[in-house]
């Protein structure tokens, strides 16, 4: 057997050391990749749970803030049937059919429907009405359905907005209150930005007209709601 020279021994030693360093680097790289993969999987699982397996909030547990004027309708078959609303998955924005009217006038109209009878009776209502001055009236508890959004009555909150003229554009005060109310409801009900709907999105009806005819304004509204969620109370 031939003895290795000192230079060769040093070379072999350096080579073994280099292999050990490479193994450690590979092990670290694999560890980092596994960690990133686990974080990615955790993120996907969290997103799926948030979107498809959200723990619903009991609407009956929510207390209205003092900036909402609670004037509940009388129980009746045409505007407040008292049917339980157990889970809320969305918020539907409407505009009133009568330009220039106030929130109080629309609330009183809903309540007057109790006096109807006969086959021509109308069934319509809304959880909230926002007036021209920005006032907000609650007509129906969040734990009951309203007659506003057709086949989404059973899982949505409805908001009617007053407007001054045929353009359907809301006053600044109405708009600000709508942003505030939607942001507050989203926070209370643990809803995300996809929960905001126009009546148009449910039935194809041109309601609220201005947001249907101006898609960019609707998108801007949703952005304003998302921003307001950070400090609404």
Image: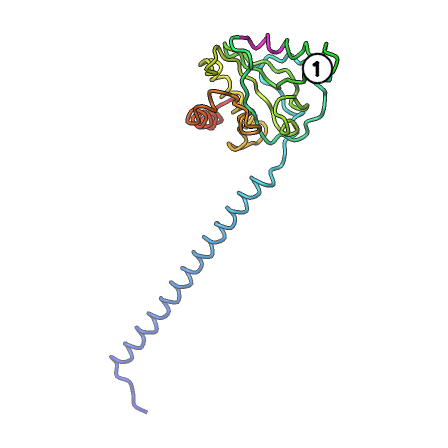
For label 1, the residue is: 120
Check the picture and name the quadrant holding the N terminus.
bottom left
Q: Position of residue 179 (x, y in %)?
A: 49, 21
Above or below residue 207? Residue 32 is below
User: Between 152 and 4, which is closer to the camera in this rendering?
Assistant: 152
Identify the image quadrant of residue 189. top right
Secondary structure predominantly adopted by residues drawn in magenta? helix
Question: For the magenta stretch, what is the residue range?
Answer: 101-107
- Across and down, in percent, residue 80 comes to 69, 18
Compared with 10, 30 (above or below) is above
Q: How is the image coloured?
A: rainbow
Residue sitting at the far bottom:
1
x then y, percent, for residue 201: 54, 29
How dense is the environment of label 1, judged by Cα within 10 Å: few (below 14), some, or many (20 and up)? few
Image spot of residue 27 (x, y percent): 42, 63
SS of the residue under disc 1: loop
Q: Is residue 179 left or right of residue 60?
A: left
């Amino acid at each position: 057997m031939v003895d290795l020279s000192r230079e060769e021994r040093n070379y072999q030693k350096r080579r073994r050391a280099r292999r050990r360093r490479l193994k450690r680097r590979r092990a670290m790289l694999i560890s980092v990749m596994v960690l990133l993969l686990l974080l990615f999987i955790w993120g996907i699982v969290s997103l799926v749970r948030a979107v498809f397996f959200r723990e619903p909030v009991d609407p009956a547990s929510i207390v209205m803030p003092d900036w909402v004027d609670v004037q509940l309708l009388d129980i009746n078959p045409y505007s407040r049937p008292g049917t339980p609303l157990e889970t809320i998955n969305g918020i539907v924005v409407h505009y009133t059919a009568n330009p220039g009217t106030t929130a109080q006038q629309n609330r009183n109209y809903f309540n007057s429907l109790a006096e109807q009878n006969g086959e021509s009776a109308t069934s319509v209502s809304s959880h909230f009405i926002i007036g021209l001055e920005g006032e907000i009236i609650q007509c129906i508890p969040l734990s009951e359905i309203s007659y506003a959004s057709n086949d989404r009555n059973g899982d949505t909150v409805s908001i009617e907005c007053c407007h001054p003229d045929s353009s359907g554009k809301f006053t600044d005060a109405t708009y600000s209150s709508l942003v505030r109310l939607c942001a507050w409801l989203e926070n209370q009900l643990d809803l995300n930005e996809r929960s905001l709907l126009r009546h148009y999105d449910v039935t194809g009806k041109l309601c609220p007209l201005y947001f249907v005819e101006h898609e960019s304004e609707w998108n801007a509204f949703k952005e304003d709601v998302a921003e307001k969620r950070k400090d609404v109370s």
